[in-house]
């Protein structure tokens, strides 16, 4: 018996039931918090907004299936490179890096591997840039400002 009203289109109702029954639903809901995708789907359904609920439900199913399948090896490898990078400890408290790292961790915790891969590559590039130091023109500009 479906807990969703008959007005919910059958394809959306099926996705909602799959989300409710998914073994990783609690994990995603906990990691995503009160403003997460599952809560947004629930609000859209309650408001009768099928056009918003449907793509969110599709994304939630993608994330749930990703969580169930585990973190891909290439993402683990990037994460490991970030964790072991010699500049990481220096930047642990830097606002930009901390924000990027936090976003990466959130993407991993919520099973959004595509976004996590993009963010991991961006964080790694930040670390490499910092290890190399500022380019000469920026160093000159910094020197002039001081």
Image: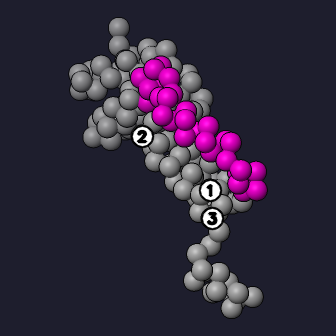
User: Dot 1: within a 10 Å radius of its alpha carbon, few (fewer than 14), some, or many (20 or more) residues?
Assistant: many
Observer-nearest of 103 and 122: 122
Residue at figure coordinates x 55%, y 22% from the top left:
26
The quadrant of the image that shows the N terminus is top left
Q: Examine the rendering and report whether any part of residue 26 can be seen.
A: yes
- Which stretch did the figure color magenta? 63-92
Cα separation, mark 3 vs mark 2, equals: 27 Å
Q: Is residue 1 above or below residue 12?
A: above
Residue 15's label in the rendered image is: none
Indicate left or right for 91 with 60 as reference. right
Query: Judging from the image, what secondary structure is the residue with disc 3 in?
Result: helix
Q: Earlier in the sequence, mark 3 or mark 1?
A: 1
Observer-nearest of 134 and 96: 134
Q: Earlier in the sequence, mark 2 or mark 1?
A: 2
The quadrant of the image that shows the C terminus is bottom right
Which residue is outermost to the bottom?
A: 144
Mark whose residue sits in front, 3 or 2: 3
User: Dot 2: within a 10 Å radius of its alpha carbon, few (fewer than 14), some, or many (20 or more) residues?
Assistant: few
Residue at figure coordinates x 54%, y 40% from the top left:
78
Residue 127's label in the rendered image is: 1
Residue 114's label in the rendered image is: 2
Q: Earlier in the sequence, mark 3 or mark 2?
A: 2
User: Dot 3: within a 10 Å radius of its alpha carbon, few (fewer than 14), some, or many (20 or more) residues?
Assistant: few
Residue 132's label in the rendered image is: 3
Cα separation, mark 2 vs mark 1, equals: 20 Å
Query: Judging from the image, what secondary structure is the residue with disc 2 in?
Result: helix
Indicate left or right for 34 with 15 as reference. right
Residue at figure coordinates x 76%, y 56% from the top left:
90
Q: How is the image coloured?
A: one colour
């Amino acid at each position: 018996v479906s807990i969703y009203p008959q007005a919910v289109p059958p394809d959306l109702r099926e996705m909602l039931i799959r989300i409710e029954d998914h073994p990783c639903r609690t994990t995603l809901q906990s990691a995503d918090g009160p403003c997460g995708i599952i809560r947004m789907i629930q609000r859209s359904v309650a408001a009768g907004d099928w056009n918003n609920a449907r793509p969110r439900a599709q994304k939630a199913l993608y994330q749930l299936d990703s969580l169930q399948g585990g973190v891909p090896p290439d993402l683990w490898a990037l994460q490991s490179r970030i964790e072991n990078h010699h500049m990481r400890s220096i930047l642990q408290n830097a606002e930009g890096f901390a924000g990027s790292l936090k976003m990466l961790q959130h993407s991993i915790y919520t099973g959004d591997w595509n976004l996590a891969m993009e963010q991991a590559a961006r964080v790694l590039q930040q670390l490499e840039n910092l290890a190399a130091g500022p380019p000469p023109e920026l160093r000159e500009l910094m020197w002039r400002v001081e």
